[in-house]
Amino acid sequence: METISVSELARKMNLKASELIGKLMGMGMMVTMNQSIDADTATILASEYDCTVHIVSLYDETVIESESDGSVELLHRPPVVTIMGHVDHGKTKTLDAIRSANVAAGEFGGITQHIGAYTVETGKGKVTFLDTPGHEAFTMMRARGAEITDIVVLVVAADDGVMPQTIEAINHAKDAKVPIIVAVNKIDKPEANPDKVMTQLSERGLIPEAWGGDTIFVPISALQKVGLDTLLDAILLQAEVLELTANYECRAEGKVIESRIDHGRGIVATIIVERGTLRTGDSYVAGVFSGRVRAIFNDRGEKLEEATPSMPVEILGLEGMPNAGDPFQVTETERIARQISSKRQELKRFENSRNIKKVTLDNLYDTI
Ligand code: GDP
Ligand code: MG
């Protein structure tokens, strides 16, 4: 775990060490200038002074180093895709159509598992879809630094054309520097006008390949299940260009997609593994909570022994409900997981109390 001495942090922040020591005392921590504080504490401390702390790695620097120096072989990983678009343009229908078309009959066993993400296996590779369409989910995850989306599929209804949320989606994707593939949906409708969609989007900088640009447009009908294979091909093509890889050997790290209470199973969290391999029995921290992976299930409810990068899985064995977007990290030992968890809970309490204080202060100024 990353640490920094108080004097070093003070130097980097252009402050006197005594200033930081006083601040830490206010947080209930007695430290001297040569003592070290952990990354979480440093982050909160720095935010008090409008400074940002860049944490190189929370746990295992050596893995990161070996990753970048190439001594660990980085292997291909499937793309993680978010579907965005205006309301009623067919996001849910598209997600459902892709899923049902790529899952063998009977595999669901009559129950549609909903875990917030799913993977489809195509002849040419796997694709993971985040099953939480909508800009809110995307922006919320981004706001928490959880940029797990590799590709955005922008669904635009061919009868309706570009609408306000279409533009919003484009802006979000551009801000996040995530490439966009356009799915021109509802082409089965008599009033469908795909050309108009292409013209409208060209005006927004998304120029179709057919017109000399570099945006892939795929005409589809989610209702009639037309064009979905072409869409998957386009996603895999885009993924190839992005050269998505990950270290499969290190301790698993990922992001929480959602968590919920399941009757009979306790707290269940859906996570997407970003790097490393997650195994049953691993100790971990998810947000402020720690635990030990009691069981791993895939999006079809099948029990797994391990999960690799870009795989969405459900895990059992949590002591609390982490938030969507929270980091998930496997730790070397259960003790370390518990230590980090209690430290984070302590810091969270401090943050909360600080927020309350701030509000009071603002109110105070208001009345003056
Ligand atoms: P969302 O709000 O973007 O998730 O949109 P939905 O997937 O809920 O779809 C909105 C409506 O459009 C529903 O009534 C769908 O049945 C319909 N719809 C979706 N895709 C198609 C399509 O390809 N063709 C036609 N005709 N209707 C569609
Ligand atoms: Mg929907």
Image (cartoon, rainbow, N blue to C red):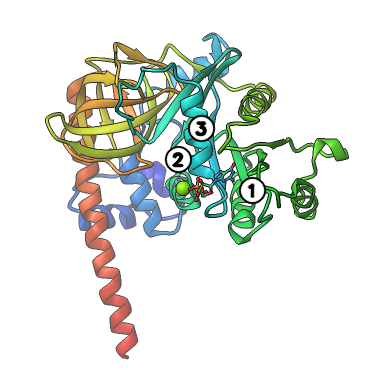
Q: Which residue is mark 3?
A: 97
> Looking at the figure, which quarter contains the C terminus?
bottom left
Q: Are marks 2 and 3 in contact (CB under 8 Å)?
A: no
User: Dot 3, crowdedness within 10 Å: few (<14), some or many (≥20)?
Assistant: some
Front: mark 2 or 3:
3
Identity of the amino acid at label 3?
Answer: Ala
Q: Which residue is mark 2?
A: 146
Q: Position of residue 9 (x, y in %)?
A: 40, 45
Identity of the amino acid at label 2?
Answer: Ala
Q: If you read the primary sequence from the N terminus, does the residue marked by circle 1 or circle 2 appear first?
A: 2
Q: Tell me if residue 37 can be seen.
A: no
What residue is at 48 percent from the left and 49 percent from the top? 134
Q: Is residue 100 above or below residue 304?
A: below
Give the spatial CA distance, label 1 vs label 2: 25 Å
Q: Is residue 70 above or below residue 353?
A: above
Front: mark 1 or 3:
3
Identity of the amino acid at label 1?
Answer: Val
In the rendered structure, the answer to whether residue 13 lies left or right of residue 25 reads right
What residue is at 58 percent from the left and 12 percent from the top? 123
In the rendered structure, the answer to whether residue 135 lies left or right of residue 115 reads right
Q: CB at mark 3 closer than 8 A to ligand 1?
A: yes
